[in-house]
Amino acid sequence: MPADKFPPFPAARPRPEAIPAAATGEGGPPILTVSGLNQAVARMLERNFPLIWVKGEISNFTRAASGHWYFNLKDDGAQVRAVMFKGRAQYAGFMPREGDKVEVRTLVTLYAPRGDYQLNVEAIRRSGVGDLYAAFVQLKERLEREGLFDRDRKRPLPGFPRRIGIVTSPQAAALRDVLTTLRRRAPHVEVVLYPTPVQGEGAAQRIANAIRTASGRAECDVLLVCRGGGSIEDLWSFNEEVVARAIVEASMPVISGVGHETDFTIADFAADLRAPTPTAAAELAATAREDWLAELRGHANDLTRALRRSLTDKAQTVDWLSRRLVNPSAYIQHERVKLAALQTRLAHATRVPLTRMRHRLQQLATHLSHQIPDTAHARRDLLDLTRRLQGAQAARQLRQRQALAGLATQLELLNPQRTLERGYAIVSDRQGRVLHTPAELAARSEVTIRLAEGSAEVGIASVQPRLD
């Protein structure tokens, strides 16, 4: 809230509830103690001034051993004491310095023991950071959606860079730090400077042009984009979109070393690797020569030990093989003896089972011969039984033929046909029923008479009873 818009102090006296009861005189105006007065004023200030943002310049900044911050906030016409307690200060994100332009979110109060009017700071930020930080977040989110910060896009740094490029200002202290670090760690590496202003009007476009120049020449293995620390306004050139896109499009890996460890810029997210400081960027770009030499010496020692161990093992193997090596003729004679022994064993192994099988076969043949019965007597009995069976069968057949002939003769005598041939006839009615007596006949009926050589239909004129 602007100073000219603050509500006026009330003209009335302190409220009665704010006055200690013991300080009230009898029959006259209340008498206040200094502590009571200060407490009443403090409560009045806290009631009438809510949390507000106040802008000013830091002066007389002190960080107490307890972690609390004490400082004055001033402008061209006035100043006011301020305190920021440890619980709030630890979330500030930066350490204020003399002369910093800041904005504080504060509660207006009064420190009663000394009667000092002061600001109890809840939050602090650099002056103008609100708009700049909003622009920073907006650009970061947009470029992140486009994929400029994807981890898969990041390129690995070369293991043995021969030439390192540096994009920074020739007058920057960061350049001296980088060159000193590279000269100390890797004096064999060539350095190419691509000079450019790192802050001020048009600095972002000139930084991007320097990066594109280095990319187009393609004469470096890795590129450092760096500058020293400063306020967010000083580092803002590295938060421009043109710089981020130039870093992404570079033909070599890019290390960003901008500001201090707590400073983050859009260039840090777009680069293949972020270093907290320019010096750290130089250390990441080139491994110290002594480290490489020490590693090479270690590898050489390991290789020497491995070679010696291998030679020792091979020598022992040769000694062992030489002890096993014998004269070829002696070896052949030895193998011949082994072959003769194997041949004897083979013959024995073949002959013994064969002899055993033959003996077993002979035993089985003898046993079989004892088990075969004498069939000569049985053959004679069988022959006698065969002759007797044939004779009995022939006699039976003769008797059966004779009986059959007698039965045939009897059957022939009983054959009706033979009776008919002797002059007899068979009379039957129309239903085929054989008639035996005259009583079965009726006048004017028809009967069938069967003769020896045919039949005839005869009508009955009359029927005579039987005459004795």
Image: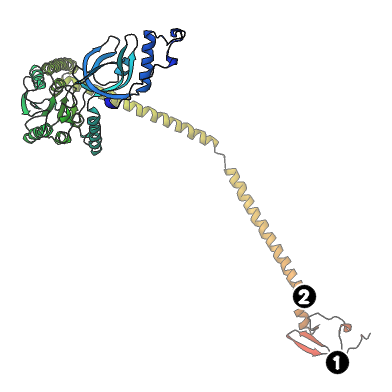
Height in image: 101 above or below 34? Answer: below
The one nearer the camera, 170 or 17, is 17
Q: Quadrant of residue 465?
A: bottom right
Q: Is residue 198 above or below residue 426?
A: above
| Residue occupied by mark 2 | 413
The answer to whether 261 appears left or right of 177 in the picture is: right
Residue 271 visible in rendering = no
Q: Return the residue found at the far front.
A: 27
Q: CA distance from mark 1 to mark 2?
A: 34 Å
Identified by mark 2, the residue type is: Leu
Q: Position of residue 224 (x, y in %)?
A: 12, 27
Q: Residues within 10 Å of mark 2 (few under 14, many from 20)?
A: few
Report the front residue among 324 and 3.
Answer: 3
Residue at point 39% right, 14% down? 40
Q: Which quarter of the rendered picture does the N terminus lie within?
A: top left
Q: Is residue 392 above or below residue 441?
A: above
Q: Is residue 226 left or right of residue 29?
A: left
Instruction: Name the image quarter holding the C terminus.
Output: bottom right
The amino acid type found where label 1 is placed reads Ala
State the residue in front, 99 or 266.
Answer: 99
Q: Residue furthest bottom?
A: 461
Does dot 1 land on a helix, a strand or a loop? loop
The residue that disc 1 covers is 461
